[in-house]
Amino acid sequence: MAAPRDEQERLITLAEKAAVELEGAQPRQVLQWAKDEFGDNLCMTSSMADAVLSTLAGEVIPGIDVIFLDTGYHFAETVGTRDAVSATVPVNVLSVRPSQTVAEQDETYGPKLYERNPDLCCHLRKVRPLQASLSSYWAWMSGIRRDETPDRADMPIVSWDPKREMVKINPLACWTQDDVDAYVAEKGVLINPLMYDGFASIGCAPCTRRVAPGEDPRAGRWAGMNKTECGLHT
Ligand code: SF4
């Protein structure tokens, strides 16, 4: 259940304080703080591009709910990664689906809405389902990092998410790609096979393409469109 109104002021102050105190902290320390503060009122999201945050969270907060937005447009490899995480990592993977199937959406809005109005498509298939599923918690975590895009360069490790009226935590915020690679090698972390096939950032199949060596990893998302985020982290 969402935090009651009279708790929200306390959570806003808590988030501001934690943003300062946890600045530069390693992911395990952030995860331990989140577990101590929120217990069962905590969840995380995963795009299933890799299982880095799921694996770290499984170490520190075994059984944590991991929300996967099952848009109906995912690559088979992404769905396979979700199933492998669910079977091998000690977390509770929850597949959250939009209110309409792709066929129903096509009937309502016409086919290939992602080509004509990707913001609306993302709203219907990602933002709204996430909003509904997060309403059961007081805090949510994601695996986004500061080094991924210029828009994410200044994001705090902990903040108040005013849109969803809950605390947002980014345990990997301070990690670089090198840190991720070292952890993956050390723990044998599950990686979506597409990451070894030219995809540097993975979203829905119609809106994701391979990138060339040296190209911005996010350049393959909504390529050719004036869009860089799906609206989950903005
Ligand atoms: Fe639709 Fe593309 Fe957004 Fe997926 S990423 S929800 S297909 S616009």
Image (cartoon, rainbow, N blue to C red):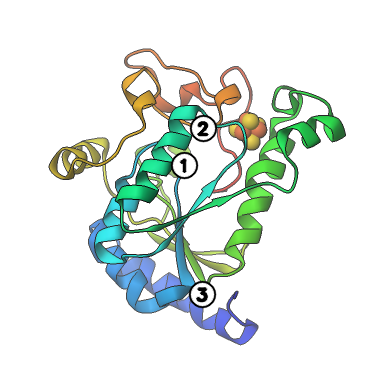
Which residue is identified by label 2?
203
> In front here: 220 or 202?
202
**Looking at the image, which residue is at 39% across and 37% down?**
81
Vertical relation: 2 (above or below) 133: below
Which residue is identified by label 3?
12
> Quick check: which quadrant has ligand 1?
top right
**Looking at the image, which residue is at 74% across and 37% down?**
120
> What number is the disc on residue 150?
none
Quadrant of residue 28 within the rendered picture: bottom left
Mark 1 element type: loop
- Left or right of 172: which side holds 223? right
* On-image quarter of the N terminus: bottom right
Tag 2: amino acid: Gly
Which residue is identified by label 1?
47
**Looking at the image, which residue is at 76% across and 32% down?**
103
Distance Cα–Cα, label 2 vs label 1 = 7 Å
Residue 154 point in image, percent of width and height: 41, 48
